[in-house]
Image (tube, rainbow, N blue to C red):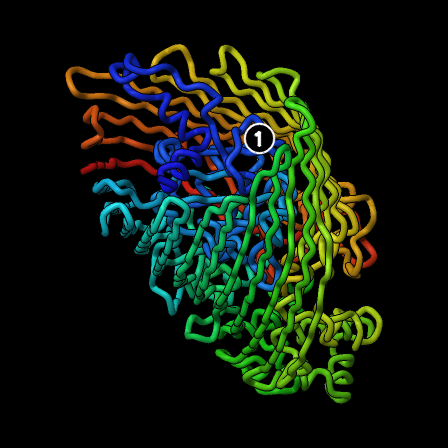
Amino acid sequence: MRFNQVLCGTASAVVLAGLGATSAAQAQAQDIPTIDSIVVTAQKREQNLQDVPVVVTAVGAKLLQDTGVRDIKDLTILTPGLTVTSTTSEASTTARVRGIGTVGDNPGLESSVGIVIDGVYRPRNGVSFGDLGEMDRIEVLKGPQGTLFGKNTSAGVINIVTKEPSFEFGGEAELVYGNYDAKGASLSVTGPIAGDKMAGRIYFAARERDGFNKVVTGKGPSDRDQDADQGFYTVRGQLLFIPDDRATFKVIADYTKRDENCCGAVQIRTGPTAAILGLINGGPALATTADPFARVAYSNRGAPSSVEDKGVSLEGNIDFDWGTLTSISAIRDWRTDNGQDSDFTTADITYRNKDGTNYSQFRTYTQELRLAGKAGKLDWLVGTFLADERLETRANFLFGRDYEQYLGRLLSRSAANPAGIANFVSALTGRAPNTTFTAGQGLYDRYSQRSTTISLFTNNTYQFTEAFGITAGLRYGEEKKDLFTYQTNSDGGIGCGTALSPAGQARIAGIVGAAATPTVIGNLCLPWANPLFHNRSTNQTRTDKEWSGTIKAAYRFSPEVMSYASFARGYKGGGFNLDRTQSSNGLPSGGNGVTPIYDTSFPAEFVDSYEVGLKNTLFNRTVLFNITGFYQKFEDFQLNTFLGTSFAVRSIPEVTSKGIDADFLWFTPVRGLTVQSGFTYAKTEYGKDAVPNDPTNALALLPGSRMSLAPLYSASGSVTYETAVGTGMKARFNLGAKYSSSYNTGSDLFPPKIQKGFTVVNGRVGLGAEDDKWMLELWAQNLLNEKYMQVGFNGPLQGSSGLSATQATYVPANDTNTYDAFLGAPRTYGVTLRSKF
């Protein structure tokens, strides 16, 4: 049957590695697996891994289970060159390959690393973050993959395939308990529904866990004393219909609901503004001496987060005499509602309210059609991809009850009076105290964006001889984006408006002097307080029409050794910054700028990638050793960075990435023992030219430097061993580790944000029935309790790095910033009971 052919053909490299780790009793009845049997679909056709001229790290179901992989962030332990981080919420999750990725806090920016789940493209990395359920395999493809995998894959693709229904009845149940009071349960059932024509599978899981961070709430209003907790449930159902030997149809529907508190930040360095925060708060507003790995967050507002993700897809495959037609249609909805203590202190400075006016929502429709076949020496494929994405974003950003006093003390402090003057803002504006910036007032913005994509593509391989073949691919795409923006201030921006008036400017000049007036007004008119945004609506449109493609030459020196060289042109569409941005105009010389920027668009990102690789199948075809050298040059790289008051998008003229990828897999002579490892060296750097449109030199450290979150070296390894124990029993052991060399975690590359090299180790020991009817496992994630940061950032309105329009060199003595960070997970451990039936 066609179904069985498909199921057998898509086994990945490490699925078979898992098969190699069977019990000793079973191994005596079979040969050790060989590399010959490894089949992947990295080029959307079934091929032996060693015949594919692409860097592919393939991870199968058993190894994913052994190393505790439930989502794309967990996947990093098995994949060198891959980092995945989260920031203000788990919805702001970013994947990077070889140091290249796009920060996920701004929904206007699309991903450099594409994520595809069961053939369906996800519009942002955060949209694909969640429990992936029962997985068959994950393939990580490195380098541009836009020819076959669609838009926004300039750095790579994470291709996730879940388990299909089976025509044999069966199921699996799982119970989990761990530290931080972690509890989880899952149940899956599969089997025939209508004889040998239709089968189904359903999976349900629910998980919860206490928070990793303790929270000091101060005067509130939040009284929640934990952060970075977990709480969600998910359900996924599949129907597989096989009407005859030539066709299969598969319907997948899924729903996930998360209600969590994520993510509070801890201090990695406390600056001098902490004294002012403590003064207005009546007690410690943040850590007096920063100790980030005490895992204490200071937050009076908390970080509540809700995510709802749902969708349905239909995949059809029909075989004809001349080839196969594949169609994948999908509709998906995703929404996240969030609240945030935006100053990350217990002082009530700024916050976002989770009240239905602070959310992002995607509704996407996608359709892919492919025709593929073989004619003599030619393997051919043509297709089209259509997408309609509707993005709706609502944002609020509000003044806390301490905002006016804190800002006044900052503006009036001096060496003689480091605490400043409490009612200084009132003196500057001439308004009664606490009426310039009234608590609970602020911005309420709306962004509605529609993006439509149509593309045509082809990918063909011609085998000139048994040893030599060439693959050529080409894609043409048109993408149109229409953005409607409506921005308003609930108080009309009255405080800044008073300061901008001629009388207000004269009053301020009389208090601080003419030279300091522009800077003072700039601080009174930060984007969320600026009346020039009030009741402002704009419409913007942009269209990109671009070609991308690839050409690869492969030569097989022998049945065991294949070499290849490739060139690929990758592309990621331009877009719009969905945040308030102000220019340096509108104030006398020296001001911070108050004029709203109408055109918030940024151009498309391009990459030219070159690779030379060698794929080796050694020692009687039981060892895989693949090595690839690469060079990538990006133009107009889309950098999203937080400047302390807003997210700014900058197009970096040049970014280069060069290095080596290596993968190793060994089916050892010891029955049941398998070794898998990988290594990446990636020197990913900005060009030497200054960053355009950076008048305050906030990004002055970038030119010629290694990119943030781009380790020079990373290596991963996993050892699995399974053996018989007694009669009818077996034991299974797995130890996995990932090493990353040092890198800077901040997009502005300020030195305090550097993360030293670190190693994360996961381990699992299981004892159960030889026929897998049950198994009891003890496990630990981050077994050695390695302490590391995900992302470091500047505490909002809490000091200065010392960089300015006249001082572009970083001087540590001039840096008065408080620095915050989102941390990696600590050690977690527990027990899992599995049962199969």
Relative image position of residue 640 (x, y in whole percent): 65, 56
Q: Residue furthest front?
A: 321
Relative image position of residue 429 (x, y in whole percent): 66, 83
Q: Along the horizontal axis of the image, is 91 left or right of 472?
A: left
Relative image position of residue 256 (x, y in whole percent): 35, 58
Residue picked out by circle 1: 714
Question: On screen, 308 above or below 428?
Answer: above
Residue at the image point whose x is 74% and y is 46% from the top: 634
Question: On screen, 274 above or below 482?
Answer: above
Q: Callout 1: 10 Å neighbours few (<14), some, many (20+)?
A: many
Locate the C terminus by quadrant.
Answer: top left
Q: Nearer the viewer, residue 338 or 391?
A: 391
Residue at the image point whose x is 49% and y is 15% from the top: 621
Question: On screen, 625 above or below 399?
Answer: above
Relative image position of residue 716 (x, y in whole percent): 51, 28
Residue at the image point whose x is 39% and y is 62% from the top: 310
Locate the N terminus by quadrant.
Answer: top left
Residue at the image point whose x is 41% and y is 39% from the top: 6
Q: Nearer the viewer, residue 484 or 348?
A: 484
- Report the number of discs: 1
Q: Residue furthest bottom?
A: 503
Q: Nearer the viewer, residue 806 or 321?
A: 321
Does residue 289 appear anywhere in the picture?
Answer: no
Amino acid type for the residue under numbered disc 1: Ser
Q: Along the horizontal axis of the image, is 310 left or right of 581?
A: left
Q: For residue 725, what is the image quadrant? A: top left
Question: On screen, 738 above or below 313?
Answer: above
Does residue 99 appear anywhere in the picture?
Answer: yes
Q: Secondary structure at mark 1?
A: strand
